[in-house]
């Protein structure tokens, strides 16, 4: 049983451990929500669409030179950077929110050695691609543009929000691929609205307003971007990999997507968290083996 003094001490320690900038941000949103709620909602919506900007270096693969390319999205206004390695059937790899193409290099290396052409790219507002704000609708446009430039595509693989992008792109864009691998996928952006608002100190009463502003900025209701509903009518093989103890994206996301996707295989990645599974030898082998078997699986499912 925890004493009141002990609980107070732990709370005090947690407060002191918070970065000063985060504490100031939360205070600012609490004040703004009281005196100018619409402005607070607009500001929160803007932050929701602003990913953390990680390293800007491009992906590097040892002992292999990349073929670089660039395409434009958002009606030619935004430049997206990409890289490819190897020859053979093309596998398009999509990183997650706040990540870069470099996150997918371990899987790209494995695929390249197995006789595939691995194609990576930085989504808008990530890595070496242009932009400061972005959203899943823009990611869908970017994936479609990259696929059109480097296709035909044999398979897709996506991590986290990249996994949601893969699932929704397959359902909405009619991409002709053999199958897909989703690594620690999320269901969609709306699932994180409450967590995000709590993190920045936006009161719960202002969340719906924030979502309305996001809809205006993006041009689509965030709740319509839902991988669970997108995959229900897909008839291509898929494998979903997720750590049941993932602290960033709950296991329930992967389970719901796998349950909704006919014939989908769900592989637990115990103890690997949200990002380590991208570098784990067992997971990399399982993903490569799955992709290698796709022609046979596709034939069985269409029979």
Image (spheres, rainbow, N blue to C red):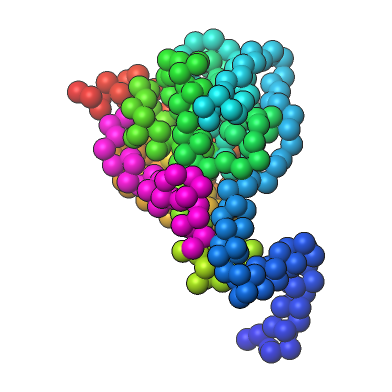
- Placement of 91 over or under 44, stated as above or below: above
- Considering the image in quadrants, where does the N terminus appear? bottom right
- Placement of 199 over or under 272, stated as above or below: below
Q: Residue at x 74, y 68 (%)?
A: 23
Residue that lies at the very extreme toward the left in this rendered image: 303
Residue that lies at the very extreme toward the top in this rendered image: 87
Q: Residue 182, image x and y in percent?
A: 46, 38
Give the magenta part as a residue range: 209-237
Q: Residue at x 57, y 69 (%)?
A: 37
**201 and 156: which is toward the camera:** 201
- Placement of 218 over or under 209, stated as above or below: above
- Placement of 120 over or under 206, stated as above or below: above
Residue that lies at the very extreme toward the bottom in this rendered image: 4
Q: Residue 177, image x and y in percent?
A: 37, 23
> Is residue 234 visible from the viewing direction of this image?
yes
Q: Is residue 233 magenta?
A: yes
Q: Residue at x 73, y 88 (%)?
A: 5
Q: Residue 32, image x and y in percent?
A: 64, 70
Q: Residue 65, image x and y in percent?
A: 69, 13
């Amino acid at each position: 049983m925890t004493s009141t003094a002990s609980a107070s001490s732990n709370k005090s320690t947690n407060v002191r451990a918070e970065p000063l900038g985060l504490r100031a941000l939360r205070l600012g949103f609490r004040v703004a929500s009281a005196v100018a709620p619409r402005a607070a909602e607009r500001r929160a919506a803007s932050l929701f669409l602003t990913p953390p900007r990680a390293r800007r270096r491009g992906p590097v693969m040892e002992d292999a030179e990349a073929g670089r390319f660039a395409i434009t999205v958002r009606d030619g206004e935004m430049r997206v950077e990409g890289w490819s390695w190897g020859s053979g059937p093309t596998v398009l790899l999509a990183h997650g929110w706040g990540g870069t193409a470099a996150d997918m290099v371990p899987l790209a290396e494995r695929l390249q050695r197995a006789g595939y052409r691995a194609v990576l790219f930085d989504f808008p507002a990530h890595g070496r691609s242009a932009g400061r704000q972005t959203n899943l609708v823009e990611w869908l446009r970017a994936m479609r543009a990259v696929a059109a430039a480097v296709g035909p595509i044999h398979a897709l693989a996506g991590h986290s929000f990249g996994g949601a992008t893969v699932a929704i792109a397959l359902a909405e864009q009619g991409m002709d691929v053999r199958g897909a691998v989703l690594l620690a996928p999320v269901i969609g952006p709306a699932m994180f609205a409450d967590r995000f608002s709590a993190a920045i100190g936006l009161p719960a009463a202002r969340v719906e307003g924030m979502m309305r502003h996001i809809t205006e900025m993006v041009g689509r209701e965030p709740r319509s971007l839902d991988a669970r509903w997108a995959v229900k009518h897909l008839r291509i093989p898929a494998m979903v990999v997720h750590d049941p103890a993932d602290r960033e994206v709950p296991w329930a996301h992967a389970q719901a997507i796998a349950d909704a996707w006919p014939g989908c295989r769900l592989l637990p990645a115990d103890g690997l968290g949200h990002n380590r599974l991208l570098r784990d030898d067992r997971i990399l082998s399982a993903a490569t083996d799955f992709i290698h078997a796709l022609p046979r699986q596709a034939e069985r499912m269409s029979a």
